Amino acid sequence: MEIRRLSGITSVEYCFANRIYPDHQELIREGSVIFAYGTFTGIPIVGLAGIVISTEIVSGQTIYTTKLTFTMADKGNLTKQILKEISGNPCCFRIRDVYKEHHLIGLDKKPHPTVIYKYANEPVPGGKRGYDIEITYINILSTLQLR
């Protein structure tokens, strides 16, 4: 199993999968650089997000498991709306790293990323308060670089 990481993720945005339009002239494969059009909504993250991409060979096919983890600030109703949208609908995620490069997790077709979240409220003054979110994407593609 091979593991690779992207540099620190400074922003995370989401778009409903049925509202994203990848623009490519050739078959999309691992390492492709594409345009993708859609209306993305920002997620208020605390600090940097982390991403780990692991690969595994299954029946001769490379399968990528992409895990994006971050803490989302608790902003009341806005946070509840975002959680409802990303966990209840197929979504794609656009991330930006510290080098200002954008990458896409997920496409307009299945399989879609899955979202798991839990509320964290540390019982100390100044402790962490917010939602820990893990987005997992398993496919023959990991992240696609966006132009």
Image (spheres, grey):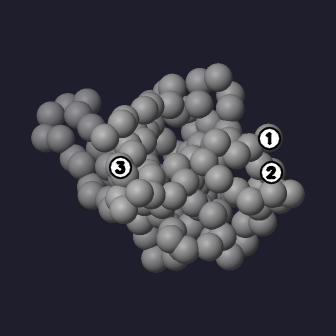
Question: Residue 103 at x, y = what percent?
Answer: 63, 43
Give the residue at mark 2. Answer: 35
Front residue of 129/6: it is 6
Question: Residue 51 at x, y = what percent?
Answer: 43, 39
Q: Quick one: label 2, few (<14), some, or many (20+) residues within 10 Å? A: few
Q: What kind of residue is marked 3?
A: Glu
Q: Quick one: label 3, few (<14), some, or many (20+) residues within 10 Å? A: some
| Residue 45, visible in the rendered structure | yes
User: Looking at the image, is 106 positioned above or below residue 32?
Assistant: below
Give the residue at mark 1. Answer: 147
Q: Where the C terminus falls, by quadrant?
A: top right
Question: Residue 146 at x, y = what percent?
Answer: 73, 43
Q: Earlier in the sequence, mark 2 or mark 1?
A: 2
Give the residue at mark 3. Answer: 56
Which residue shows up at 43% across the image and 70% down it? 87
Q: Earlier in the sequence, mark 1 or mark 3?
A: 3
Q: What kind of residue is marked 1?
A: Arg
Which residue shows up at 86% across the image and 57% down it? 25
In the image, taking residue 83 as reference, residue 100 lies left or right, namely: right
Labelled disc at residue 44: none
Foreground label between 1 and 3: 3
**Circle 2: element type:** strand
For the residues labelled 2 and 1, say whether their Cβ atoms are less than 8 Å apart.
yes
Front residue of 122/31: it is 31
Which residue shows up at 41% across the image and 65% down it? 114
| Residue 48, visible in the rendered structure | no
**Circle 3: element type:** strand
Q: Which residue is outermost to the right?
A: 25
User: Looking at the image, is 93 positioned above or below residue 126?
Assistant: below
